[in-house]
Image (tube, rainbow, N blue to C red):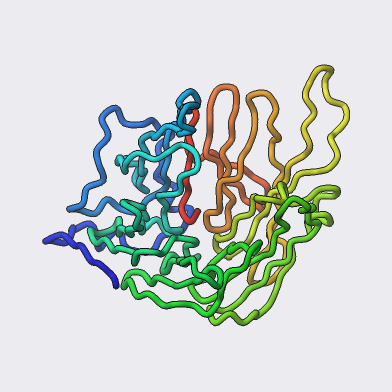
Amino acid sequence: MTVWRTGATRSPASAVVAAPVTARELLAGLPGRLLPPATPTALPTDRAVGRGALLYQIDDPDGFDASTGAFPRRPMYLVTATGEQFGVGLVATVGEFSQALSPDGRWFAQRRDGQWWIRDLTGVTERAVPPGYELRQWSTDGRALLLEQPSGDGEAYAAFALPGGELSPLALRGTPGRRMLAFLDGRELATAEFNVGPNARPQGQLTIAIQDVDGRTVRSVSLATTQQVGPGDVRNAHVPLVRGGGDPPAVWALVIGDEVPTGQPEGARAEAPMTLVGVDLRSGRPAGRIDLVPPRGAESEYFLGLAGSEVLLQRMTADSSELVAVDPATGGRRVLTLLPGRARVIVPGD
């Protein structure tokens, strides 16, 4: 069942902002410096606000309650493609997945009272995901959601079409250790097996199966991490940092070298090299390689997600935090905006 909630009138802006945009255009309107509003305006329910460019909150490093084990709940802000900001509720700073943006920024997903709701930011319509389903993956074209429903036979999956809200159960079932990496245009699923458990060993190659929604394997591609970056592997065999999406669709994995570079200044903490490697899910060819700044003092770079053909990083320095887009073809970086200190960022499609 799909629950609809619409306003009495359609926003005159909705016909304009609903036009397709590229990921680069979606992020082009961010201000030079992003600051939380002194008096946040709640996301309005009676008018369109335009596509979302990102979500963020400010972490509270001293907010952990040791007596209850609870992390602090801090305000989350939605930033639109034109730079407007709206408050979208309180979210725990650790361990809570309750808000997300579609890759095209049109749809805002929010979990309220144990149920997911999907809001069209280019209008006022909101749809409820049927109870019992959890959000797993946006389709790369932003026109569907992959939902999961726990069952006795493993995870069952369904596609939730947008904008119509039709729910279509899928034949494919989840298995322990297999992760969904990308939902290609709502028609194919890219998945991979990961080593889990106490005897897990690092993987030298990540094999990605691409299946149609009926569960048949169409093809497979490989991300040969050891060949591309030398000694190293997909970082953390238990919870690997691997993300899929973008246009053209790709999967990128964080790889950490086994060898620590020599020649470090005396007294400096040696860090192993960190690299992102990607594979194009259509062609199977390498999508590129990006060397990250390893954690060193106040400097570091973190993998946030994908936007079109670019890779999004959060770069930390002694003076600032920046949202950075990287062109895998050239390695060139461009700063999209300066972020507030201790900002936690959620980018479209993540």
- Which x, y percent locates residue 98? 41, 49
Q: Using residue 180 as the reference point, say whether residue 6 is left or right of it.
A: left
- Which x, y percent locates residue 190? 61, 68
Return the residue found at the far top: 267
Instruction: State the residue in front, 13 or 208.
Output: 208
Instruction: State the residue in front, 75 or 299.
Output: 75
Q: Quadrant of residue 295?
A: top right
Return the residue found at the far right: 262
Relative to 281, is 255 above or below?
above
Relative to 84, is 271 above or below?
above
Q: Residue at x 77, y 24 (%)?
A: 269
Can residue 339 be seen from the camera position used here?
Answer: no
Q: Residue at x 87, y 27 (%)?
A: 263
Count the labels in the image: 0
Image quadrant occupied by the N terminus:
bottom left
Q: Residue at x 38, y 34 (%)?
A: 74
Q: Residue at x 44, y 53 (%)?
A: 25
Can residue 230 be seen from the camera position used here?
Answer: yes
Instruction: State the residue in front, 20 or 148.
Output: 148
- Which x, y percent locates residue 264? 83, 25
Relative to 33, is 51 above or below?
below
- Which x, y percent locates residue 178? 64, 64
